Amino acid sequence: MSALVNISNLGVTFRDGPRRVAALSDVNLTIEAGERLGIIGESGSGKSTLALALTGLLPASAEVSGRIDWADGQPILGRDIGMVFQDPSSSLDPVMSIGEQVAEGAVAHLGLSWGAAKERARDLLAQVKLPDPDGLLRAFPHQLSGGQRQRVAIAAAMAAGPRVLIADEATSALDTIVQAEVVSLLDGLVKQQGITLIFITHDIALASQLADRIAVFRHAQLVEVGTARQVVTQPREAYTAALLGAHLDLGTPPLIGVAP
Ligand SMILES: Nc1ncnc2c1ncn2[C@@H]1O[C@H](COP(=O)(O)OP(=O)(O)OP(=O)(O)O)[C@@H](O)[C@H]1O
Ligand code: NI
């Protein structure tokens, strides 16, 4: 594997009124091209801040130190990096048809005509295993379930053929069965297309089933990174062991494989 991006001594500080909050502090991490990296840690540990730093979406008020070096130059959000958030309504426009939203990225970044982009959108909707992709092109987000909307958001994120997909708590709002289906879908898509997946979650069990490697964040710091197996079976940090104790029910059958 070769490095996709090298993160060195990354620090991000937010100003919160008179207070300064260190959201990331001295983070060193290399993300390999084509790997599935799980990012775990409790609320406020800096996971989303890392995603925003990678995508160039940090607010101007954030103070950034250190370096993020991409092997192939700074990727363009929407073209080279696709992003899927917890709440699809933050990425889907309620008054725009599903077809237009999924096609948009292909028009903007691949230079396709709307006609060609709609055809691509239909193929993408089929790839994310949504029923009746032709009919869906003309549907609106409110006509879909939460899980279906999240599939549309994934299709939209994939529209321009990105090499990196960042899913930030993308399945957290879904019930367990739908979550398993969406995780299994993501797994298949990124494997098939050789996309690097950065999967952010509170759920160490979910991360361990999807990821090749897991990075554990706590209080703005990267406390541990290793293969999913190593982090789960032989955590080096007491904190990781505590997370495992609290969240990983080893009696629960794996989510991937359960989904149809
Ligand atoms: N725009 C902002 N302005 C001020 N503080 C912020 C901002 N964004 C994040 N923070 C602070 O930075 C820290 C890290 O937040 P971040 O959203 O990265 O955590 P997280 O691990 O993604 O948490 P969660 O699991 O709840 O999504 C927190 O203390 C948060 O309050
Ligand atoms: Ni977050």
Image: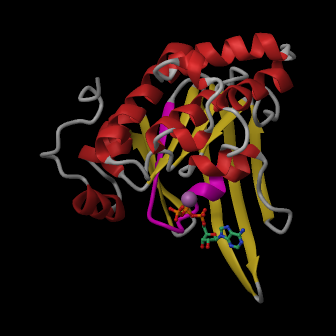
Q: Position of residue 224 (x, y in %)?
A: 44, 53
Q: Nearer the viewer, residue 24 or 88?
A: 88
Quarter of the figure that contains the N terminus: top right
Image height of 169 relative to 105, above or below: below
Task: Please provide the residue range marked out in magenta.
Answer: 36-51
Q: Magenta stretch containing residue 37, yes or no?
A: yes
| Residue 55, picture quadrant | top right
Q: Nearer the viewer, residue 93 or 166?
A: 93
Image height of 178 relative to 27, above or below: above
Quarter of the figure that contains the C terminus: top left
Q: Position of residue 189 (x, y in %)?
A: 50, 21
User: Which residue is painted at 76% across and 78% down in the image?
Assistant: 15
Q: Taking 250 as reference, is 228 left or right?
A: right
Q: Position of residue 25 (x, y in %)?
A: 64, 65
Image height of 88 relative to 158, above or below: below
Q: Position of residue 180 (x, y in %)?
A: 33, 36
